[in-house]
Amino acid sequence: MIVFRYFKRMLTAFSSHPFYNKYVKLPSATDPVPPEIRDDYRRYPFFKDAVGAIDGTHINCSPTAQERAASRNRKGLLTQNCLIACSFDFLFTYVLSGWEGSAADAAIYNDA
């Protein structure tokens, strides 16, 4: 539980003023197409309007006894299910964490 508590504190600190306002820069409609897309003929026609990639991951956690059943994922591990988006230069643009490991990816995507 201590790890979860500190993880939640750090997540709150990183997503709050002044850190968020100073270090997070969201892409705008006027930003140029990233060179990883523009210079690759296999990607450009399909991803020219993409601003990044999105995926889910499970992060190990130590929940309380009451939260253990919900935190157990399909492989039997105690995890948090997180959704993370990043730009093509590998900078995080969005993180949604805190969902229990048993939560379906579609539910987390819908929440985002």
Image (spheres, helix red, strand yellow):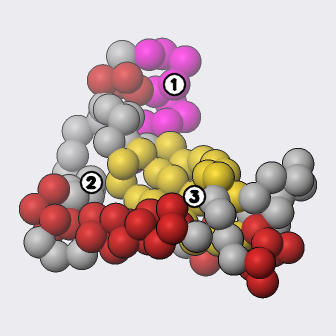
Nearer to us in this view, 84 or 63: 63
Judging from the image, what secondary structure is the residue with disc 2 in? loop
- Is disc 3 placed on a helix, strand or loop? strand
Mark 1: few/some/many CA within 10 Å (<14, 14-19, 20+): few
Q: How many residues crowd around disc 3 within 10 Å: few (fewer than 14), some, or many (20 or more)?
A: many
Q: Nearer the viewer, residue 44 or 20?
A: 20
Say if residue 73 shows up in the picture: yes
Q: Quadrant of the C terminus?
A: bottom right
The residue where tag 2 is placed is 27
Quick one: quadrant of the N terminus? bottom right
What span is in magenta?
A: 40-51
Above/below status of 99 relative to 33? below
Q: Residue at x 61, y 77 (%)?
A: 111
Q: Nearer the viewer, mark 2 or mark 1?
A: 2
Amino acid type indicated by mark 3: Leu
**Pointer 1 residue:** 43
Residue at 63% in and 59% down: 61
Question: Which x, y percent locates residue 93?
Answer: 36, 54
Q: Position of residue 86 (x, y in %)?
A: 42, 45
Q: Nearer the viewer, mark 3 or mark 1?
A: 3
Give the image quarter of residue 82.
Answer: bottom right
Say if mark 3 contacts mark 2, CB within 8 Å.
no
| Place of residue 98 in the rendered image (x, y in percent of width and height, measured from the top left) | 58, 71
